Image: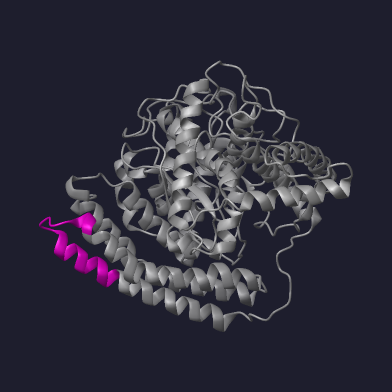
């Protein structure tokens, strides 16, 4: 996932008052997926559950993502709404946070059991979410609709909420414009590249989706049911208005920001970055120390790459020299060029290769008993929706944990049949990404957590800011990406008769190259611009969760008791540590 930062002034989260840091400390019973009201018990539990429900009301697309309407009837209407960023709404939200904080302070902490402390970073609103949130809200609604006969999806009530959300988009973007102008007046300007990619290009993709793609998709989903014709007419009308609003928003961005501004607004500075490492990612090293650590990891994995590349070269009968550093580097490039020759003819064949690699990974997991994989477990891969293609190459979006309906989606961005890009996506490169996004990576991770949703404290499902916006890179990605990177390594562990585990030697070469790339990225990247910093002491939680492996830094899971262990009950051996990319 390419996370692109695009700051603009707006609201601050509950971290301003240190609320989440405290509320995450209790793990009383949480309603099961599909369950109803908040658990009965201590004053603290009631307060925590009240906070959870209200937060999802304030962040309705996050509620859709989690399946909030399956958690509580109070969240049933959130699927028809978007976040309200008007000043009066934000003042009301702040008042709610202060009320919760006063109630929290009245509780004797000695009565609370130990547990993980979860925190949110204080942040300003990001335009990447203004662009993506409306689409994701509508897309996730369809993702979790109940399937019916003849390809139909959802009920009349479900589609009525989709229309309501569409009708909210013009006002939502009008508020976004006001907030961005206020940010500009305060000197808070985005980087020109982010305006171009996330703002203008993203708005154009949204215009196309809401005007054309969505009505065409909805027609067969609605079918010939009595309410279908009227609903499709309302949806088309609301989609057209939303498309017009995004076209105007793109024009606003072009007129408001100078596309030729040469100022690099991406960097935040070493001091700010170090603060984020310590207080949000819980990394014990400074940025400078990570720079040196990254050099060690690059060297370690580079040596492994040379060894596997030499093995691939011998198998392909390539007469290459690996005797000196310069020769090894040249020979690796030659091996990669050789492997790129086996590339797909077109995007359809590439999609089929990913599906085949995913099925092979699941079969390998069952054969080796890496996990107890249910007989009905399936993994599918689909093309990325156009509106998301500017920001991802491959990605995974889970099914909502609090509902029994919905499926996870492994997205693959097509190349538009570009020969150069198809070579990059050659056959040997596919298996590593399939393991990362699919099994035993993101897809397996989220399906496991969803099946154990009742055991995970409700507040631990909350995301920092909106789902996958610029705030998420500072907290949520450590857990999700940490597991997926571990999954890549797990599949490479040698077993009898298979020195590269699940992978062929060529596939393992790409897995190692990906790993080296993660380490190298941390050495070559500039300090990313973070969100606004909360006051000292407000973001000091200690993480726990997925068992610490020797090759990860600070993997933070959503539950300290919900851990995915191999079927053997012990952690497999792992290579030395590396720093992960979120």
Q: Which residues are magenta?
A: 220-238
Q: Residue at coordinates 39% horizontally, 42% vertically from top-left?
A: 400
Q: Quadrant of residue 193?
A: bottom right
- Answer whether residue 474 is magenta in the image: no
- Left or right: 37 with respect to 115? left
Q: Residue at coordinates 82% horizontally, 46% vertically from top-left?
A: 328
Q: Where is residue 147 drawn, in percent x and y?
A: 24, 45
- Left or right: 228 with respect to 441? left
Q: Is residue 24 above or below residue 260?
A: above
Q: Residue at coordinates 56% horizontally, 72% vertically from top-left?
A: 180
In the image, 533 versus 223, the foreground residue is: 223
Does residue 57 appear anywhere in the picture? yes
Residue lying farthest to the bottom in this orientation: 255
Q: Where is residue 80 drawn, in percent x and y?
A: 31, 57
Q: Where is residue 159 drawn, in percent x and y?
A: 24, 56
Q: Residue at coordinates 63% horizontally, 47% vertically from top-left?
A: 582
Q: Where is residue 280 drawn, in percent x and y?
A: 67, 44
């Amino acid at each position: 996932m390419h996370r692109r930062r695009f700051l603009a002034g707006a609201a601050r989260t509950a971290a301003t008052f240190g609320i989440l840091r405290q509320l995450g400390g209790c793990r009383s019973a949480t309603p099961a997926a599909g369950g109803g009201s908040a658990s009965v018990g201590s004053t603290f539990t009631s307060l925590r559950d009240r906070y959870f429900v209200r937060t999802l009301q304030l962040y309705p697309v996050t509620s859709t993502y989690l399946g909030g309407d399956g958690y509580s009837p109070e969240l049933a209407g959130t699927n028809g709404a978007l976040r309200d960023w008007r000043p009066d709404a934000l003042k009301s939200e702040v008042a709610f946070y202060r009320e919760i904080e006063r109630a929290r302070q009245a509780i004797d902490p000695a009565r609370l059991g130990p547990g993980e402390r979860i925190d949110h970073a204080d942040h300003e609103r990001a335009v990447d979410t203004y662009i993506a949130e409306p689409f994701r809200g509508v897309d996730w609604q369809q993702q979790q609709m109940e399937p019916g006969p003849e390809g139909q999806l959802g009920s009349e009530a479900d589609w009525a909420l989709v229309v309501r959300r569409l009708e909210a988009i013009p006002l939502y973007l009008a508020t976004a414009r006001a907030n961005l102008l206020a940010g500009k007046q305060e000197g808070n300007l985005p980087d020109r590249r982010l305006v171009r990619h996330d703002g203008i290009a993203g708005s154009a993709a949204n215009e196309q989706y809401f005007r054309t793609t969505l009505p065409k998709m909805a027609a067969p989903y609605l079918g010939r049911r009595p309410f279908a014709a009227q609903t499709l007419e309302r949806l088309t009308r609301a989609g057209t208005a939303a498309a017009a609003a995004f076209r105007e928003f793109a024009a606003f961005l072009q007129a408001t920001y100078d596309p030729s501004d040469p100022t690099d607004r991406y960097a935040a500075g070493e001091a700010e970055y170090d603060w984020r490492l310590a207080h949000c990612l819980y990394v014990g090293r400074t940025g400078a120390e990570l720079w040196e650590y990254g050099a060690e990891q690059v060297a370690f994995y580079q040596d492994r790459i040379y060894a596997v590349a030499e093995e691939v070269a011998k198998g392909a009968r390539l007469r290459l020299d690996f005797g000196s550093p310069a020769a090894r580097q040249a020979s690796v490039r030659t091996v990669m060029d050789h492997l790129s020759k086996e590339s797909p003819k077109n995007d359809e064949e590439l999609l089929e290769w990913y599906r085949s690699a995913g099925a092979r990974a699941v079969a390998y997991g069952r054969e080796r008993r890496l996990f107890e994989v249910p007989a009905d477990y399936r993994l599918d891969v689909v093309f990325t929706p156009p509106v998301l293609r500017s920001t991802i190459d491959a990605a995974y979006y889970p099914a909502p944990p609090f509902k029994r309906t919905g499926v996870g989606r492994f997205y693959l961005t097509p190349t538009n049949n570009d020969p150069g890009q198809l070579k990059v996506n050659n056959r040997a490169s596919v298996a590593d990404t399939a393991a990362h996004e699919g099994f035993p990576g993101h897809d397996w991770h989220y399906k496991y957590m969803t099946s154990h949703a009742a055991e995970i404290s409700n507040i631990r499902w909350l995301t920092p800011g909106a789902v996958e916006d610029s705030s998420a890179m500072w907290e949520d990605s450590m857990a999700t990406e940490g597991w997926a990177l571990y999954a890549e390594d797990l599949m490479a562990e040698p077993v009898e008769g298979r020195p590269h585990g699940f992978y062929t030697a060529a596939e393992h070469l790409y897995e190692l190259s990906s790993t080296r790339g993660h380490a190298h990225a941390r050495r070559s990247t500039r300090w990313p611009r973070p969100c606004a910093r909360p006051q000292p002491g407000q973001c000091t939680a200690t993480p726990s969760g997925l068992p610490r492996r020797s090759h990860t830094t600070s993997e933070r899971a959503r539950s300290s008791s919900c851990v995915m262990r191999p079927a053997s009950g012990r952690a497999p051996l792992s290579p030395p540590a590396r720093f992960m990319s979120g």
